[in-house]
Amino acid sequence: MDWEIRRLEETDEADYLTLLTRSKLQRDSSLTVIWGIFDNGQLAGAGGVSGNTIRGVCIHPKFSGTNALGLLVGRLRDTVLQTGHDNVFVFTSPQSAESFERTGFYPVQTRCGAAVLLESRPDGLSSYLKKLAGFKHLGNSAGVIVMNANPFSLGHLHLVTYAAAHCEHLHIFVLSEDRSTFPAAVRHRLVAESVAGRFENVILHKSGPYIISNSTFPTYFLKNGDASVNVHAEMDLRLFGQHIAPALGITHRFVGEEPYCPTTRAYNDAMKAILPEYGIAVVEIPRLHSGNTAISASEVRRLMAEGKSDELKTLVPESTYRYLVSPEGRELAQKIALNNSRH
Amino acid sequence: MKLVASGLAGTMESSDICIDVRPSDDNQIHIYLKSPVEKQYGAHIRSIIQTVLERQGVASVVVSAVDRGALDCTIIARTETALQRAIEKGRASGGDNHEQTA
């Protein structure tokens, strides 16, 4: 076998599509780098990287039993590590899980019908869960809210207020993925500021890579959600139900109604179908309204872009408003006006 | 010697072994091995890695090894290099690499 490993070019695209179709995979448009392994000029296999996750890997069956996958995965793994990540994830089909495990990946979530998630760190998930377990409180009920808070609005505060009053301890996970308008550090800080002193039973966490992240639910961060949203949602929710919820003794997950975003709505529907299997009650509450419109972070961002500071006061709490009118906040508003993304 | 950063050495080529070392959070040595000859040589490979760790004075580490049929000399070399890189990375980011003493 005379292997050559190189980046795919335009001219290889057709061959890659053929390989994908054969493996019953879709062409993943979020891949930023795609590597191919060639045997005497013929494409034997290929796969790509998106952030910290390897996806879209397929090897021609005639090369199974060779080191094609191992070599390709080695290159893909190096690609991720070189961009500064210290844990590499793989999102692949259940049939390929064993092959990936042999090349040095460890299962994160493998009970989801259509896909499996693996990671390069043997103790990645387990050390995350160990840290979380330190926050487990004894009691009859523990609730959770997962939020992007982009930015934290009165709508979010309404949800938190309701949830905190309906469970003994409330854990709020703020998404760590930095693919939204507001940087993760700012989003987290604004939640902390609004929640501090107001509630006695709220614990704030960063979501980390195991909750609605590039590895568990990449569709969330894509501008146009696609059909794979259901597969990703199931992956994320089963990971949550099987591993994260037990670490904290979660009995309830609180979420606001989603009138606007189809991706989030699909996720919420999946939540209602899947989490009860793990003994978690899903509580969906109606959105807080300001006048006739449901308050939403996207509405806040729209008003920011239009420079309507006064209207913003009716949608966000004090600390978020202070940030929005700060120089940093105004700079962000300009950026929003220029781009026009879902986030 | 105490690691504060991770280090990687080796490739997925046949006859090589890919070794990743990183700090452990429980002051123990953990060795995770994937090898096509786990049954015949798994214990042996682990003991080689353990010996290198002991020789380098590393008592707290998570080693993740992916073996592609490597000989002892390769396992030793890759393990030593991975540790060396972890130490250099630790120094580069201002870490001490040594136990803090009161």
Image (cartoon, coloured by chain):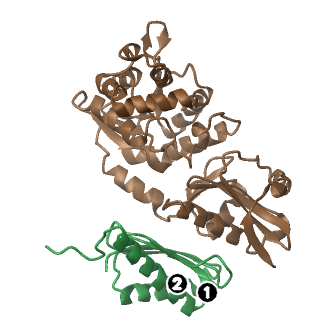
Crowd band around label 1 with a 10 angstrom C-alpha radius: few (<14), some (14–19), many (20+): some
Name the residue tied to disc 1. B70
- Callout 1, which amino acid? Ala
Q: In the rendering, at what x and y percent does residue A150 appear?
A: 45, 31
Q: Nearer the viewer, residue A253 or A42?
A: A42
Report the chain shown in brown: A
At 40% from the left edge and 84% from the top edge, which residue is drawn?
A: B53
Element type at marker 2?
helix
Q: In the rendering, at what x and y percent does residue B45 appear?
A: 53, 86
Q: In the rendering, at what x and y percent does residue A24 appear?
A: 80, 50
Q: How many marks?
A: 2
Crowd band around label 2 with a 10 angstrom C-alpha radius: few (<14), some (14–19), many (20+): many
- Which label belongs to residue A15? none
User: Is the C-beta separation of discs 2 and 1 under 8 Å?
Assistant: yes
Element type at marker 1?
loop
At 39% from the left edge and 17% from the top edge, which residue is drawn?
A: A309
Residue A196 placement, left or right of A12: left
Name the residue tied to disc 2. B78
Q: Residue furthest bottom?
A: B73
Q: Residue furthest left?
A: B102
Task: Work out whether disc 2 and disc 1 sit on a shared chain.
Answer: yes
At 24% from the left edge and 27% from the top edge, which residue is drawn?
A: A198
Measured in 3D between alpha carbons, the distance from the residue under mark 2 to the one under mark 1, in whole angstroms, is: 10 Å
Q: Nearer the viewer, residue A272 or A1?
A: A1
Q: Nearer the viewer, residue B53 or A328?
A: A328
Vertical comparison of A201 with B88: above or below: above
Q: Colour of chain B?
A: green
Q: Is residue A136 visible?
A: yes
